[in-house]
Image: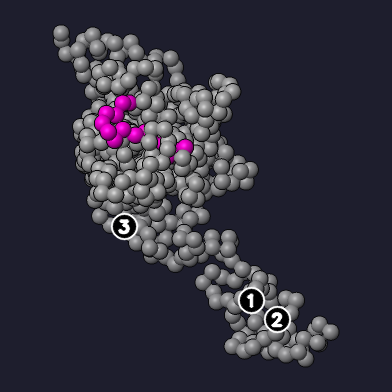
Amino acid sequence: MAKVTIHMDNKDVYQGTEDEAYDSIRAINTTKKDVILGHEIGAGAPCVKCGDACPGLDLHFWRKICRNCKCGPADHKIADPTNFETVRKIGRLFDDDRAARYNQKKVTIATQPSVTSPNVDATVENGDKPTNTTFDWIPQGATENIVSRYMEMIPKEAQPISGTHGAHIRNKQLHEQLPSHDQAPEFCDNLTQVEADKLKNFVQEYKDNALGVGQIQEVRPNEAPVLVQQMTDLMIEPPPPAEEQGLSTEHPGAPDKVEGPSTQVNQLAQKHPIGDNGTNECVSPAPGEQVTAEGDADVIEPGSPAPKWACSKCGGSMRGGDVAVFAERAGTNKCWHPACFRCHTCSELLVDLIYFWKDENVFCGRHYADQIRPRCAACDELIFAKEYTQAEDQNWHLKHFCCWECDTPLGGKRYVARDSHPYCLDCYQNTFAKTCSSCSKKIQADGQRLSHGDSHWHATNECFKCSGCQQSLIGKQFLPKSGYIFCSVTCKKKVLP
């Protein structure tokens, strides 16, 4: 069979056998589509934070914030019904050919009543009966039963149930934890060729040495988990038939069998529901408590061997049958409770279980990158230039150290910082300047002022003076009353009898 390479726009996009190549061609959607620029994606989307105060998303051309409300795109309800942008993002991380098979379609599975959803297809007459719940995402390669138990063990507000706040939270995390501009030069603001090459090398480095996808499995006593080696398959294709995995086939999603005297099933989600302790962390059994398959608490006899598995974050013990997250980069001797698989820096749940491994900890993509390269406080991109600005305890591209309001470059100029954002003197004056209670003129941003409560004055003898006798009160005691200031009770009575 001849080998064929297909070229599009002078780029090799597919290599394979002749039949496979033509299959690929036949799969191309040739219907006419409107071209959408990156800045047009989500245009007009309402802001979750600002509500009606923001007329809709209008993306700044390099700051990656809304020009109307200055919130980020992740704070806007950007509709992506086909998950096209999500698939592209995953594709850039794990190579497009694998991402095409990454399961991004909504999935409906049977869940316990503790997992609630607006998309319920079955009427529940008995609280113990499962319901059908539709998720925007589920862990790849796990059985339905394990997926259901995993969802029960993460905070309800983080469950990516279609049409809920949890689904919005996932979309926001995809944007914040996995910035597109950390993945490819075309999402950055006019990089030089040298900077673009450095970014590409950085991306290849983390793909080779840090990037991974957490895998959901049951803890098996005295057995190491079977993990995907070097993340080559990514668990994005359907798992092998249950018979080949040695799993029960009694019914779809039947729980895996765990052999041995330590056989247990994790009942923490029912016995210790998420949030019982006032936090979003999963709850471990009390010291000396053992949860059996029936959910009854047994007491571990003194001198009995300690459990092999412990959560790498909270240190809580894990026993046979418990659902855990494993990370191939961390080795086969580490695991996490589902609610504990969080970024070491921001403590957020790792979106879609995508992690970056560094210094024996898991990180989200953003905070992994922040440890390697400085990040520009204005455009949010990593800095690969030799020279950059440091100001207000932050890093800035030289060309991006600009006024937060009008984008005027501030290099070598005077500016005023407010809420960690630099403003030119004119914009600060127009936006934040106080009005003098004496002369009713604006107090210059670089001028001195005196304030008392909601009243402000130029720090001059002409403005900060007694409202009765007109003598200067700078450096002296004064008596404020009804917006006036006096040097004495006598002067006060003259003006305010």
For the point 25% across and 49% down, which residue is it? 303
Q: Give the total number of marks visible in the rendering.
A: 3
- Secondary structure of residue under mark 3: loop
Q: Earlier in the sequence, mark 2 or mark 1?
A: 1
Q: Residues within 10 Å of mark 1 (few under 14, many from 20)?
A: few
Question: Looking at the picture, how far across and down is residue 246, in whole percent?
Answer: 26, 21
Residue lying farthest to the front in this orientation: 301
Viewer-proximal residue among 66 and 296: 296
- Secondary structure of residue under mark 1: strand
Q: Which residue is mark 3?
A: 388
Q: Which mark is residue 182?
A: none
Give the vertical position of 170 relative to 15 (above or below): below
Q: Which residue is mark 2?
A: 480
Which quadrant would residue 401 be assigned to in this image?
Answer: bottom left
* Disc 1 from disc 3: Cα separation: 40 Å
Q: Please identify the quadrant where the C terminus is shown.
A: bottom right
User: Which span is picked out in magenta?
Assistant: 256-270
Image marks 2 and 1: residues in contact by CB distance under 8 Å: yes
* Disc 2 from disc 1: Cα separation: 8 Å
Question: Looking at the picture, how far across and down is residue 322, in whole percent?
Answer: 34, 36
Q: Amino acid at mark 1?
A: His
Q: Give the overall secondary structure of the magenta segment.
A: loop
Q: Looking at the image, is mark 3 or mark 2 nearer the viewer?
A: 2
Q: Which residue is mark 1?
A: 452
Question: Looking at the picture, how far across and down is residue 422, in whole percent?
Answer: 46, 61
Give the vertical position of 336 relative to 420 (above or below): above
Q: Residues within 10 Å of mark 2 (few under 14, many from 20)?
A: some
For the point 25% across and 27% down, which residue is it? 233
For the point 22% across and 36% down, which residue is it? 222
